[in-house]
Amino acid sequence: MSPDEYCHQKTVQSGSSFYYSFLFLPPERRRAITALYAFCREVDDTVDETSDESIARIKLAWWRTEVAALYKGGAGGAAAATHPVMLALQPHLAVYDLRQEHLLAIIDGMEMDLNQSRYLDYPALKTYCWHVASVVGILSASIFGVTDARTLAYAEKLGLAFQLTNIIRDVGEDARKGRIYLPISELQQFGVTAADLLNARHSDKFEQLMAYQAARAHATYDEAYALLPAADRRAQRPGLMMAAIYRAVLVEVERDHYHVLTQRISLPPLRKLWLAWKTYVRG
């Protein structure tokens, strides 16, 4: 199996909404974004699928050495890294200006999940979101095509919107892992306790809390769209496809009155494909 095939298989198996937007890219950009997504999945799985925290830290440290080795190898020569994901990323580093500090920032974000499971306020949560999502948005936008620096600000903001949506959708699933991403200050504001989330206690107060989270996520999508320059809109269609899918998930959560403590709301594959296609056609 080639490195590109490994990354493609990793992406397909994840069942992620991102996959549907990749389908509309030219082959070279599709290989690059698939390799980037596979990298994100690998380091995320290192934390989520490793029960021993010390082992997870060792694995993340190994991924840091792989990133360092990848850039030491250089874009023009044989990469010193060994993992298939790194080998698949290597040809695209210089072409799309994929920076070492951004890949390391993603690993830093995954390590934050080992260091803390609560966030005091929204600014603290935004820092986490920047590492695990906004940086990915910047890297992805670079692959899709950027002619205006403002596009990177759009991508950073859109990544935040995606992560806020994930947090809303996965409140129950994360609580079962002992993690609460909703800011403590906002739980207190609405009279919801950590125990309510950990014990899946749905209430009117919880719905009000989640409506507040959803409103902020919607506002963040709108802020991101406003930042996207017209000159790069066509190139950035894959990100807009992802946004259409993610925002549709957010709307479904709202329609279901935020019953996310005991279930994970998602869209069927055909609807995801339809939303991606509709966004692509509209340009």
Image (tube, rainbow, N blue to C red):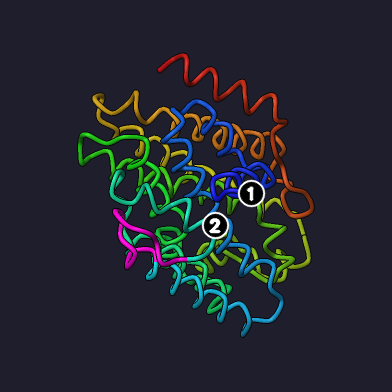
**Sequence-first disc among 2 and 1:** 1
Region of the chain picked out in magenta, as a range:
70-81
Q: Is residue 145 above or below residue 123?
A: above
Q: From the top left corner, tell me how far across and down residue 4 is, in percent.
A: 54, 45
Q: Is residue 160 above or below residue 63?
A: above
Residue type at mark 2 is Pro
Residue type at mark 1 is Met
Of residues 59 and 272, which is closer to you in this image? 59
Q: Name the main secondary structure of what is drawn in magenta.
A: loop
User: Which residue in the protein does label 1 denote?
Assistant: 1
Q: CA distance from mark 2 to mark 1?
A: 9 Å
**Left or right, 123 with reference to 229:** right
Marks 2 and 1 close (CB-CB < 8 Å)? yes
Q: Give the secondary structure at mark 2.
A: helix
- Would you say residue 208 is visible in this rendering? no
Query: From this viewpoint, which residue is outermost toward the front?
Result: 78
**Left or right, 103 with reference to 176:** left
Query: From this viewpoint, which residue is outermost toward the left?
Result: 148
The residue drawn where x is 39% and y is 35% is 222
Residue 77 on the magenta span: yes
The residue drawn where x is 47% and y is 58% is 86
| Numbered tag placed on residue 84 in the rendering | 2
The residue drawn where x is 61% and y is 68% is 46
Q: From the top left corner, tell me how far across and down residue 76 is, in percent.
A: 29, 53
